[in-house]
Amino acid sequence: FARCFENHGFYRNYVVTVDGNVWNFNGEFERCRIEFSDDNRKQTIVWEWKPEGKWLPLCDRTAVRTD
């Protein structure tokens, strides 16, 4: 599990699963899929949210390690 806090005290709880290079964070109203590249230098992150009972895109992010 994971509990993520925002700066004003709001938080969400997530069930976390790992399958190879993919981590999934599943919550009641948001979910996230993080895929790590084989060389561990890049993360592809996809967030979705469920405002009215249907999963919708929230944001996509890419993180790249620089030396």
Image (cartoon, rainbow, N blue to C red):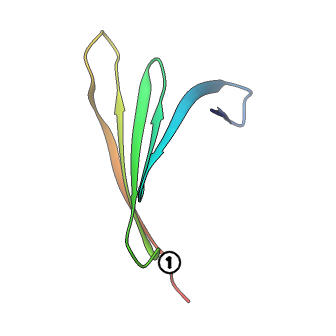
At 44% from the left and 20% from the top, the residue drawn is 29
Q: Nearer the viewer, residue 39 or 19?
A: 19
Q: Circle 1 sits on which residue?
A: 65
Q: Identify residue type, mark 1.
A: Arg
Q: Nearer the viewer, residue 15 or 46?
A: 15
Q: Nearer the viewer, residue 20 or 53?
A: 20
Q: In the rendered image, which quarter is residue 64 located in? A: bottom left
Quarter occupied by the N terminus = top right
Q: In the rendered image, which quarter is residue 4 located in? A: top right
Residue 10's spot in the image, x, y percent?
67, 24
Q: Is residue 55 above or below residue 1?
A: above
Q: Is residue 28 above or below residue 49?
A: above
Q: Residue furthest bottom?
A: 67
At 27% from the left and 23% from the top, the residue drawn is 55
Secondary element type, mark 1? loop
Q: Residue furthest top?
A: 52
At 37% from the left and 70% from the top, the residue drawn is 37
Q: Residues within 10 Å of mark 1 (few under 14, many from 20)?
A: few
At 56% from the left and 89% from the top, the residue drawn is 67
Residue 12's spot in the image, x, y percent?
60, 25
Q: In the rendered image, which quarter is residue 58 located in? A: top left
Residue 63's spot in the image, x, y percent?
44, 66
Residue 65's spot in the image, x, y percent?
50, 78
Q: Nearer the viewer, residue 3 or 5?
A: 3
